[in-house]
Amino acid sequence: MPVEAGWEAESPTNGNMEGRVAGAHRFDGVDLRALAVQVPTPFYAYSANAIRYRVSRLRQAFHGLDLRICYAVKANSNIAILHLMSQQGVGADIVSLGEMQRSLKAGVPADRIVFSGVGKTGEEMAAALEAGVWRFNVESADELSLLQAIAQGKGVVARAAARINPDVDAQTHAKISTGKAENKFGVSIDEARRWFAGAAQMSHVLLDGLHAHIGSQILSLDPFGKALRRVEDFRRELVEDGHAIASVDIGGGLGVTYRPGLDRPIAIQDYAALVRETFADFKGILVLEPGRHLVAEAGVLVTRVVRIKQGSDRSFLIVDAAMNDLLRPSLYDAWHEIVPLHDRTEMARYDIVGPVCETGDTFAQARPLPRCGADDLLLIGGAGAYGASMASNYNSRPLTAEVLLDDGRYSVIRRRQSFADMIAGEQIPQDWHEA
Ligand SMILES: *Cc1c(COP(=O)(O)O)cnc(C)c1O
């Protein structure tokens, strides 16, 4: 699929509300209003072309380097999305066995999978070794020695990278900052230096990589510059001390536009230029772990107005999507663009809320919108990342449907959960046991 230069301009989430009005209802060639007749709201819709476009743009920016893109599965873990990634030659960055199984099922080869996370258990390490994942991003000394023991027990050699905590401020929301000394992720350069010094004693771990991931939704090159410089200085020191470093994994974190005109994402060319310059002397494999960058703006949540409730000093627009479907506003105070799929022009101001019994179940406050009424459709933009993957059954609301759009066609990639699906595994006690 060639990159369509103008593709982004067609996206409902291109951060341009005015520009959108003409073709507002279409996303990847599909009329969302017609789709909402076929699929029950709320539902997620993802544009296959928007994802392909971002993958190929990223790849072009790093052209000539030995690049491996390992998509951060947690951003959107639907197997159809993972399959789309694998079709583009993209691997996976996983943080659990569930994510590993999804990736393998979707056709991602095991040797393109990296395993990150602070809490890997022995059981998970064993299963990942059996599956043949490419490498473990190791986050503590305890994890490293457990990996050695488990690989030894299996008679295999585990490839590992040390996750460095470069102690830089990613200048993002505190809950998605991961690269400061006070965060639980990675180890200091001092500690990693000791790991490499002892690496030769590990018979079944090949410690030959470095990894850093400093946070998410990063909009400034500055923290990347600082973190990557620390990683590269450390790499050179290790090489001078006789250690072979086969791969450097620079994580994910690239920010996207949630607030049109306010969020200014880093241009991919600038990011690539920084990486090329910083790692000019490094000839090994460069790993990227983008999540949000590839999928956030490629997804929308389509929701329907249930009713308008007039409060004493404000109007509540009550929609059929809620915090259990899209948690970001409640969890991170995240701002999402909300666009009605109707053409009225008279404006009103609404607090846009879901039906869940929590005050935090609020998508937007005092948001100016064209006047709405019951049954109107709204689209919530920037919902392709950390949307469906963070959803829950809170308030016993079924998980939403997810739909993949591709050039005027659609395919349901997850049906809306049924009541039976939702309570599967639960039971009223029939027999009791002693423990
Ligand atoms: C979450 C995560 C990512 C992806 O972060 P984005 O901001 O979505 O790009 C990459 N690497 C690791 C280790 C992560 O935990």
Image (cartoon, helix red, strand yellow):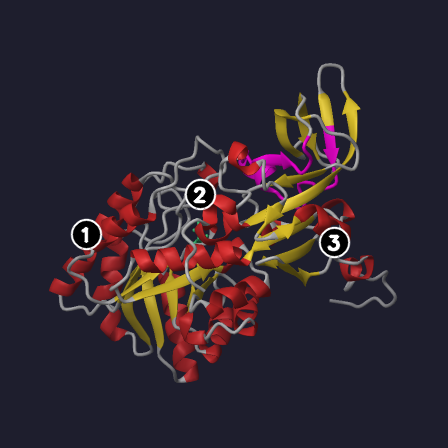
Q: Quadrant of the N terminus?
A: bottom left
Q: Going by the image, does 253 lie left or right of 233?
A: right
Q: Earlier in the sequence, mark 3 or mark 2?
A: 3
Q: Earlier in the sequence, mark 1 or mark 3?
A: 3
Q: Name the residue type under label 1.
A: Glu
Query: Are dots 3 and 2 in contact, CB under 8 Å?
Result: no
- Is residue 12 depicted above or below 130 in this figure? above
Query: Are dots 2 and 1 in contact, CB under 8 Å?
Result: no
- Is residue 22 depicted above or below 55 in this figure? above
- Disc 3 marks which residue? 39
Residue segment shown in magenta: 317-343
Decide if residue 139 is in sight here. Answer: no
Does the magenta portion include 305? no
Query: At 45% across and 37% down in the image, what residue appears?
Result: 174
Residue 269: x percent and y percent? 29, 49
Decide if residue 400 is in sight here. Answer: yes
Query: At 66% across and 41% down in the image, what residue appears?
Result: 323
Residue 145: x percent and y percent? 37, 68
Circle 2 SS class: loop
Residue 193: x percent and y percent? 22, 59
Circle 3 SS class: loop
**Foreground tag (3 vs 2):** 3
**Foreground tag (1 vs 3):** 3
Q: Which one is in front, 40 or 333?
A: 40
Query: Are dots 1 and 3 in contact, CB under 8 Å?
Result: no
Q: Which mark is residue 277?
A: 1
Circle 1 Cα neighbour tier, 10 Å, few/some/many (<14 / 14–19 / ≥20): few
Q: Quadrant of the C terminus?
A: bottom right
Q: Earlier in the sequence, mark 2 or mark 1?
A: 2
Q: Name the residue type under label 3.
A: Val
Q: CA distance from mark 3 to mark 2?
A: 28 Å
